[in-house]
Image (tube, rainbow, N blue to C red):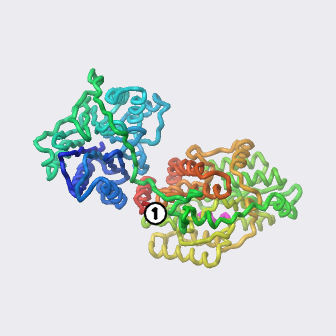
């Protein structure tokens, strides 16, 4: 199982920064023998505990630029003149995955709860029953370790002493648990075990203590100078099953105690200054955001003025909807009594579903609905389309290509992208759906119906950052993509061509599909009516109408109803958010702020909620397309970030 390790350093010990870094790398390398799928570190110095964790081998993590920046930042405060400031405590983890994907950093260790940060070696086999037993506790990950520390915190809140709470956790838990942890209210590092996989060297008199999962690892760590000197004559002790140890960080001697019996009543005085927990590294973006909206500094082409307001807020030019009367005037010449008089493109998402409802029930048109189902329209979206068409009595025309071929093309382009991650090339994953424009044009001629609605054009849903990552700056197209300027169309094609030449993996069987998508989207012209150019987009009204009138279904793994009909959205938004620190949700909420629909604080809370990864949707997407999601997420997480 996993490898855990750590140490306490305090006066009279003395150590250089270089020696500390060498020891840290050595400890990780020794622990890596027990698990190579993720790693993490906690550093307790002063009144803060800082943590860093990442998927992948420990040896790769400590050599990575993000970890090096994390250590540089820490040492800028904890060292002077090449000497490490003391007292200090450190503990780490090298993970063999048992519960929870390592590509989800919340599942990696150290685990941080409200009042505890710790690492765990072992497997808790009654995790589900423990969560059921404590339904009021907050669950934020899939790793079994979390429930141990959540229960521990809860017991402390209810009045249990620290040792009594720890003993009760072990009484409730089933399975192996070797723990090392610190708390916000105690100036000590705690160790405990119920199977004896912990070894400790205590020379706190000399300012040094260390522990590891195996005796050989600990012996290897202290065999070289200066650790051998700091260890002195102290022997390595074996913590037996049912034993625990408290290692004071600033002063006092180590104290062993049992996880049962009368010793639980003997709680030492641990009065200390409260400690702050900080997750500073391993995938969490620290971004400067606009003082008005919530767009971050990583948004392509953004700039900030002296007041911190971004260029998009300063340059905003509102485009009010033309209104119901304008739409009524437009549709009047096309009405056909008792016959189909318009075609409405329907994806199964909320915007097109509401548009179909409105055109039929509010304007009295006789629509024919059409869907281009290229294999990434979700089952949920299909069910919602069925609900609307059945209740409204609307004919539904479906156009579908060779879906297995389309999915192969997606897989080929994802595999090519993984060789050289590039945010500008992410839209290539969705190239297969762009022929829905083509089929809208085709159906017009087949059915002899000139009026074609696309339920798009909502300025709040602008996502110009997607081409922004291709160095394209375009703002006046009104959500009609063929209206991009000629210069930008050429620049976009040139960007894609340059990436194809730089990464020949893109020169695969999907190339013709991608070319057709580009032509259909940016070159071929249309005169479709864009519904939200006329009818104001109202999120609450749209959702209320669909739920009330059609029992419209939402996604169980998403708090928002946006993009739930698109099988690709969860995956590409994860990429944008992981690498750039923002996604479509940030642009959407920022546009709502500019339109005066929500405030900035509300928007910040919403993007925090909406940017939570949709794991179930991504698992389904990977299964349909045919790629290994775990391996793919590992590459995405390891890709260079646009933020520090």
Residue range of the region highlighted in magenta in the rendering: 432-436
Q: Specify whether residue 435 is painted magenta.
A: yes
| 205 to the left or right of 179 | left
Residue 129 position by quadrant: top left
Please name the residue shown 41% across and 45% down the image: 107
The percent position of residue 421, horizontal first and vertical second, equals: 45, 65
Looking at the picture, tell me which residue is in the foreground, 421 or 595: 595
Please name the residue shown 43% across and 67% down the image: 420
Residue 402 position by quadrant: bottom right
Q: Quadrant of the C terminus?
A: bottom left
Instruction: Find numbered disc 1 in the image and state the secondary structure of the residue it sits on.
Output: loop
Residue 435 position by quadrant: bottom right
Looking at the picture, tell me which residue is in the foreground, 51 or 120: 51
State whether residue 498 is above or below residue 600.
below
Inspect this view and state whether residue 409 appears: no
Few, some or many residues within 10 Å of mark 1 (<14, 14–19, 20+): some
The percent position of residue 439, horizontal first and vertical second, equals: 69, 65
The percent position of residue 239, horizontal first and vertical second, equals: 21, 34
Please name the residue shown 33% across and 39% down the image: 182
Please name the residue shown 67% across and 71% down the image: 482
Looking at the picture, tell me which residue is in the foreground, 359 or 381: 359
Q: Specify whether residue 16 is painted magenta.
A: no
Q: Quadrant of the N terminus?
A: top left
| 140 to the left or right of 603 | left
Q: Main secondary structure of the magenta part?
A: helix
Q: Residue furthest top?
A: 262
Inspect this view and state whether residue 346 appears: yes
**Residue beneath disc 1:** 642
């Amino acid at each position: 199982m996993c490898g855990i390790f750590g140490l306490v350093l305090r006066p009279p010990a003395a150590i250089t920064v270089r020696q500390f870094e060498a020891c840290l790398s050595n400890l990780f390398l020794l622990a890596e023998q027990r698990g190579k799928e993720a790693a993490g570190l906690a550093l307790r110095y002063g009144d803060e505990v800082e943590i860093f964790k990442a998927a992948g081998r420990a040896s790769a993590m400590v050599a990575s630029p993000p970890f090096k920046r994390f250590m540089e930042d820490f040492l800028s405060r904890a060292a002077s003149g090449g000497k490490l400031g003391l007292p200090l405590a450190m503990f780490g983890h090298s993970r063999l995955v048992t519960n929870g994907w390592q590509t989800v950093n919340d599942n990696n260790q150290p685990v941080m709860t409200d009042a505890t940060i710790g690492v765990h070696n072992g497997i808790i086999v009654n995790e589900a029953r423990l969560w059921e037993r404590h339904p009021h506790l907050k669950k934020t990950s899939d790793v079994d370790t979390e429930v141990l520390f959540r229960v521990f915190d809860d017991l402390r809140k209810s009045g249990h002493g620290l040792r009594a709470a720890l003993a009760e956790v072990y009484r409730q838990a089933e399975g192996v648990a070797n723990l090392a942890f610190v708390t916000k209210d105690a100036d000590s590092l705690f160790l405990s075990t119920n199977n004896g996989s912990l070894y400790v060297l205590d020379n706190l008199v000399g300012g040094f203590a260390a522990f590891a999962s195996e005796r050989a690892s600990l012996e290897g760590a202290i065999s070289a100078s200066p650790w051998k000197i700091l260890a002195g004559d102290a022997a390595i002790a074996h913590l037996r099953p049912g034993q625990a140890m408290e290692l004071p960080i600033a002063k006092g001697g180590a104290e062993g105690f049992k996880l049962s019996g009368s010793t639980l009543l003997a709680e030492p005085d641990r009065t200390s200054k409260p400690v702050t927990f900080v997750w500073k590294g391993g995938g969490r973006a620290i971004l400067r955001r606009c003082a008005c909206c919530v767009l971050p500094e990583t948004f392509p082409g953004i700039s900030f003025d002296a007041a911190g307001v971004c260029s998009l807020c300063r340059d905003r030019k509102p485009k009010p909807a033309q209104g119901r009367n304008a739409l009524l005037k437009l549709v009047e010449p096309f009405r056909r009594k008792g016959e189909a008089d318009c075609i409405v493109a329907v994806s199964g998402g909320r915007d097109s579903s509401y548009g179909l409802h409105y055109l039929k029930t509010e304007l009295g048109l006789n629509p024919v609905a059409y869907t281009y189902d290229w294999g990434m329209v979700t089952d949920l979206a299909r069910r919602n389309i069925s609900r609307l068409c059945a209740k409204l009595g609307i004919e539904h025309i479906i156009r579908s290509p060779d879906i297995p071929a389309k999915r192969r093309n997606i897989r080929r382009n994802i595999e090519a992208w993984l060789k050289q991650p590039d945010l500008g090339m992410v839209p290539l994953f969705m190239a297969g759906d762009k022929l829905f424009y083509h089929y809208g044009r085709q159906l017009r001629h087949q059915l002899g119906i000139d009026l074609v609605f696309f339920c798009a054009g909502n300025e709040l849903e602008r996502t110009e950052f997607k081409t922004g990552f291709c160095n394209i700056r375009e703002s006046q197209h009104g959500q009609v993509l063929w209206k991009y300027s000629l210069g930008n169309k050429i620049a976009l094609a040139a960007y894609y061509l340059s990436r194809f030449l730089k990464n020949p993996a893109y020169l695969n069987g999907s190339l013709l599909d991608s070319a057709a998508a580009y032509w259909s989207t940016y070159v071929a012209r249309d005169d479709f009516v864009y519904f939200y150019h006329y009818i104001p987009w109202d999120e609450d009204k749209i959702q209320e109408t669909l739920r009330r009138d059609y029992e419209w279904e939402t996604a169980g793994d998403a708090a928002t109803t946006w993009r739930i009909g698109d099988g690709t959205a969860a995956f590409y938004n994860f990429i944008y958010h992981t690498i750039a620190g923002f996604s479509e949700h940030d642009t959407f909420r920022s546009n709502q702020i500019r339109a005066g629909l929500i405030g900035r604080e509300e928007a910040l809370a919403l993007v925090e909620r909406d940017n939570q990864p949709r794991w179930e949707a991504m698992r389904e997407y990977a299964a349909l397309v045919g790629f290994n999601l775990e391996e793919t997420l590992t590459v995405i997480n390891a890709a260079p970030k646009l933020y520090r």
